[in-house]
Image: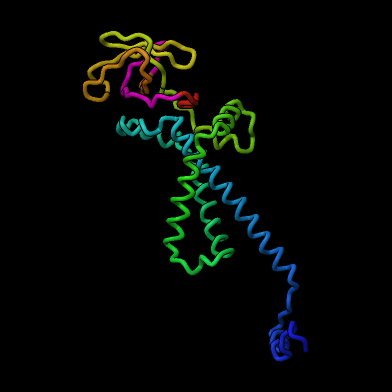
Amino acid sequence: MTDHQPPQSLLDTIHAAGRRMRPRWFFWLKSVALALSTVLVAGLAVFAIGAAVFLYRERDLGTLPGFGWRGWTPFLGHFPWTTTIVGGLALIVLLVLVRRLTPSYRWPLMFLIAFAVIGGTAIGALTSRAPFHGQIANRALRGELPVIGPAFRPRFDDEQVFIGTVSVVTNDSVTMMVGDEMIIIEISDDTHQPPSFRPSIGDRLMVIGERQGDTIQAEGIRPAMRRSGMGMPR
């Protein structure tokens, strides 16, 4: 028996248990496969979380809860559920792969979970400003991406939520450019709006209300986040 051969007693024990020794290349390939899987899953997690943050921001979803109960229906309808769920599942799979690939099984589980969630969310949030998210979203809205396109489109098109830029202001109304349309927003004492709110020309507003022709009777009106992007998909 050479120095590189296991003792005969060990070989007899392995054979008696019905097991067989695997060649070294098997474990090498297994390690490579685990490493590649980890990289791919990590990339998927970062992309999905970045897409979720991008869609949340570009749809101005943070403004909707300010309308009270009236804003929660469009909030839930436009929330990026698909990308959020995919990102969460990818983080779980990534956690399992990391525990198998590294000595992290010695670390507390809650520490690993917190590290994966915080790290993945932070990196995803940073990548959410990458231009490819906007390019993908615009192509999805044009129906050019049948596979991942639905994840970048809202669950339904809420015809009572409008985002635009103010061009004219009067005592009881504002005229707003919504897409390529000029719409008059009628404001009354019943309109839900922030205290002492006075819109100005150039402001970007979000309005909830019933549209009749070129006029909307505003049930609620609030400042929208100022940025160029998709806005609330139409």
Residue 30 in view: yes
Q: Is residue 220 magenta?
A: yes
Q: Residue at x 27, y 11 (%)?
A: 172
Place of residue 17 in the rendered image (x, y in percent of width and height, measured from the top left): 69, 85
Up the image or down, 146 lies above or below 224; here it is below
Give the magenta part as a residue range. 211-227
Q: Within the image, what quadrant is residue 22 found in?
A: bottom right
Place of residue 150 in the rendered image (x, y in percent of width and height, measured from the top left): 57, 35
Place of residue 186 in the rendered image (x, y in percent of width and height, measured from the top left): 31, 13
User: Which residue appears farthest toward the right when viewing the image?
Assistant: 1
Relative to 46, 160 lies left or right? left
Up the image or down, 139 lies above or below 21; here it is above
Up the image or down, 82 lies above or below 14; here it is above
- Which part of the image, by quadrant, shows the N terminus? bottom right
User: Which residue appears farthest toward the bottom when viewing the image?
Assistant: 9
Q: Residue at x 59, y 63 (%)?
A: 101
